[in-house]
Image: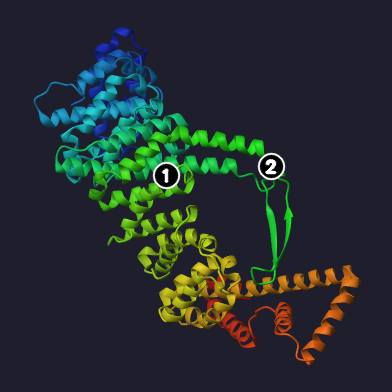
């Protein structure tokens, strides 16, 4: 009851005449004293300050009557922590719009009392600067566009950001007062509000990147998302071009001291990782989506629906064509998307990227982290701008090839991804292609698995067009794949590495399945049945069994279609059939009488055509069925592996 009486008395002061501002200071002081005793009497759950205080609402009604006087009073007493905290809470209140407007319309007063306050005490000056940052953050959160018109405030924030005092406080944040720990976060959030309006101020984007060079207790994921998602996805092409051009100028800058050079290089790494590469990835993917027609579109581009009958390359193919989109409209859309890409990354920028970033004299001095990001960047450019980069092929392959000899795992694996993308889009000597492919097959270490799989997924579809079949029955890359399985198959990680590749590209290995199915069947028990095998290995073994079955079904369907196709031709022309019977009988007579070798060879070819294709024999089928039964029984009782049991059935 006493608390409610005091709150009611404070609530009467806003009814007094305007001259009652003389009560401002004593009323605020009394309110603070009343709030200080609230925890002792366990009122409102024991929290007697802030929004839970019963005295704040009545006090705010009085303060908003004279908002200018209120602001002047609190700005003069910002060095007093209790008063500054009360002022911050008051400005956050939804009824204090007038008080916020007074501060917004008088930025010079705010600067004079906070950022430019003349005081000899270092601790007091730090307190006032942080109070100023907090007030600016509150105002910019209430009105995000306000800060865009206050260049003086932004300059003060940037001055604080570049100051050595802030950097020192960031290093010692474990010892700071809790209210000062969020200083850098508040500055970043204010600068983000400013950058959303002034999108050509790219220098601020580079400044904010420096926060990622320090260890801090605060989570700055929101800043990374601002770079990677908002800028890359929502900003216009012209605004992205300003950022790209600004990055090239920033990349050319060199520090005066060794420490500055090291810091600049770390910033370049973060700029590539968080800004430049996401921008280009979004630009290229958007253009690709626009150029690809929807799956259900009637005006899709030329599509050949091929159905192979038989097993070798000479097998017969039935082709059906879907309606093609008008060439003029497709070319127009392609030109529009290329113009959009050039508006983000012009030809001069591409030249600068190739000649200065990866071909300059400083390239040999780059740290490993920067090399990785440059390899990512060049890989992206090769994938989407290979036509424009034709004249720079030597520079591109030289930069990537040098990193294949690196001892650092990350740069070496990204170099493989880069070279594989180069092989995919440019003509490359077959010896180099095979060398890269075999090296990737033999790289099965867990730490390199992700990037090696990515590189293999790029180069494997390109192997048929880069390595010709020649006179051999199976391609060279098939032979090398089988050779590694036979010679190094005793290593389970090596075996898993190759089987995963085949599972990801079943169509490429289908024609040569005779080389792999026996080894696949023999690997099932090794991978899936031992008790110490992880669920990933069991799933791989099950995928292998599933792949063998799918290959066999496809083979049977194609063989059936082939027989129907041949029988349809025979029924279509009875005279030709009669003639072929007569020719076959004459050939038999020739053979009986010692006919020519050429006739024997022709009949042998026809016999091979009528031979049944490769299918798993009875022993293989029995091994597969036994494996599925055993694996299904082993995994049916554990919840995490029950899905494997269902698949086995």
Number of residues whose C-alpha sits closer than 10 Å to that of mark 2, classed few (under 14), some (14–19) or many (20 or more) = some
Q: Is residue 212 left or right of residue 307?
A: left
Q: Position of residue 443 (x, y in %)?
A: 38, 68
Residue 2 in view here:
no
x 69%, y 39%: residue? 326
Cα–Cα gap, marks 2 and 1 = 32 Å
Element marked by disc 2: loop
Could you classify mark 1 by the number of other residues whose Cα lies within 10 Å: few (under 14), some (14-19), or many (20 or more)?
A: few
User: Of marks 2 and 1, which one's residue comes earlier in the chain?
Assistant: 2
Q: Which picture quadrant has residue 591?
A: bottom right
Residue 373 x/y as whole percent: 34, 49
**Residue at figure coordinates x 36%, y 22% from the top left:** 148
User: SS class of the residue under badge 1?
Assistant: helix
| Quadrant of the frame with the N terminus | top left
Determine the image quadrant of residue 520: bottom right
Residue at 22% across / 30% down in the picture? 160
Q: Which mark is residue 242?
A: none
At x 64% / y 71%, what residue is drawn?
A: 312
Residue that mark 1 sits on? 391
User: From the viewer's perspective, is the residue at label 2 or at label 1 nearer?
Assistant: 1
Is residue 524 visible to us here?
A: yes
In the rendered image of this protein, does residue 471 appear above or below residue 238? below
Q: Please state, as top left, top right, bottom left or bottom right, where the C terminus lies in the image.
A: bottom right
189 or 383, nearer to the observer: 383
Q: Is residue 467 left or right of residue 564?
A: left
Position of residue 392 relative to residue 237, above or below, is below
Give coordinates of residue 633: x percent, y percent: 57, 81
Left or right, residue 213 beside residue 233: left
For disc 2, the marked residue is 325
In this view, the residue in front, 529 or 88, is 529
Q: Residue placed farthest to the left in the image?
A: 120
In the image, 183 versus 447, the foreground residue is 447
């Amino acid at each position: 009851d006493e608390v409610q009486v005091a709150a009611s008395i404070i609530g009467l002061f806003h009814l007094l005449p305007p001259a009652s501002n003389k009560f401002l200071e004593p009323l605020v002081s009394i309110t603070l004293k009343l709030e200080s005793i609230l925890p002792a009497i366990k009122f409102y759950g024991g929290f007697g300050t802030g929004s839970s205080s019963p005295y704040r609402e009545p006090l705010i009604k009085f303060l908003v009557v004279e908002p200018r006087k209120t602001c002047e009073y609190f700005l003069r007493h910002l060095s007093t922590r209790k008063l500054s905290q009360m002022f911050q809470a008051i400005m956050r209140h939804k009824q204090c719009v007038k008080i916020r407007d007074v501060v917004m319309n008088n930025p010079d007063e705010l600067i004079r009392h906070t950022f430019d306050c003349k005081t000899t005490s270092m601790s007091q000056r730090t307190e006032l600067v942080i109070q100023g940052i907090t007030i600016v953050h509150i105002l910019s959160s209430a009105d995000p566009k306000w800060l865009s018109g206050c260049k003086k405030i932004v300059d003060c924030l940037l001055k604080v950001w570049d100051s050595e005092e802030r950097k020192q406080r960031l290093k010692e944040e474990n010892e700071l007062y809790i209210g000062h720990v969020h200083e850098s976060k508040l500055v970043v959030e204010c600068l983000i509000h400013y950058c959303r309006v002034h999108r050509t101020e790219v220098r601020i984007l580079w400044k904010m990147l420096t926060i990622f060079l320090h260890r801090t207790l605060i989570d700055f994921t929101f800043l990374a998302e601002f770079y990677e998602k908002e800028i890359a996805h929502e900003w216009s092409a012209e605004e992205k071009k300003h950022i790209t051009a600004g990055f090239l100028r920033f990349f050319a800058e060199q520090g005066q001291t060794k420490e500055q050079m090291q810091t600049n290089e770390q910033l370049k790494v973060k700029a590539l990782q968080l800004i430049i590469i996401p921008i280009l990835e979004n630009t290229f993917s958007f253009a690709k989506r626009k150029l690809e027609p929807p799956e259900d579109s009637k005006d899709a581009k030329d599509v050949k629906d091929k159905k192979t009958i038989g097993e070798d390359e000479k097998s017969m193919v039935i082709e059906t064509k879907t309606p093609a989109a008008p060439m003029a409209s497709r070319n127009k859309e392609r030109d529009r998307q290329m113009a959009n890409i050039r508006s983000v990354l012009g030809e001069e920028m591409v030249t600068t990227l190739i000649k200065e970033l990866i071909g300059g004299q400083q390239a040999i001095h780059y740290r490993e982290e920067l090399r990785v990001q440059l390899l990512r960047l060049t890989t992206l450019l090769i994938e989407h701008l290979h036509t424009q980069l034709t004249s720079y092929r030597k520079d591109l392959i030289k930069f990537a090839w040098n990193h294949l000899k690196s001892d650092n795992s990350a740069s070496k694996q990204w170099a493989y991804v880069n070279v594989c993308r180069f092989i995919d889009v440019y003509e490359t000597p077959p010896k180099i292609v095979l060398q890269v492919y075999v090296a990737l097959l033999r790289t099965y270490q867990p730490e390199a698995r992700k990037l090696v799989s990515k590189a293999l997924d790029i180069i494997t579809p390109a192997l048929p067009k880069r390595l010709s079949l020649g006179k051999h029955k199976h391609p060279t890359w098939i032979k090398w794949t089988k050779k590694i399985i036979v010679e190094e198959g005793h290593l389970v990680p090596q075996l898993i590495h190759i089987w995963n590749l085949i599972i990801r590209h079943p169509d490429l290995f289908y024609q040569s399945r005779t080389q792999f199915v026996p080894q696949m069947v023999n690997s099932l028990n090794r991978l899936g049945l031992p008790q110490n095998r992880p669920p990933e290995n069991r799933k791989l073994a099950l995928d292998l069994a599933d792949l063998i079955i799918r290959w066999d079904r496809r083979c049977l369907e194609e063989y059936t279609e082939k027989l129907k196709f041949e029988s349809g031709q025979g029924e279509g022309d009875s005279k030709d059939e009669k003639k072929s019977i007569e020719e076959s009988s004459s050939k038999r007579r020739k053979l009986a009488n010692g006919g020519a070798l050429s006739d024997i060879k022709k009949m042998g070819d026809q016999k091979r055509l009528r031979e049944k294709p490769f299918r798993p024999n009875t022993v293989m089928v029995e091994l597969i069925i036994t494996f599925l039964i055993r694996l299904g029984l082993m995994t049916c009782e554990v919840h995490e592996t029950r899905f494997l049991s269902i698949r086995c059935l």
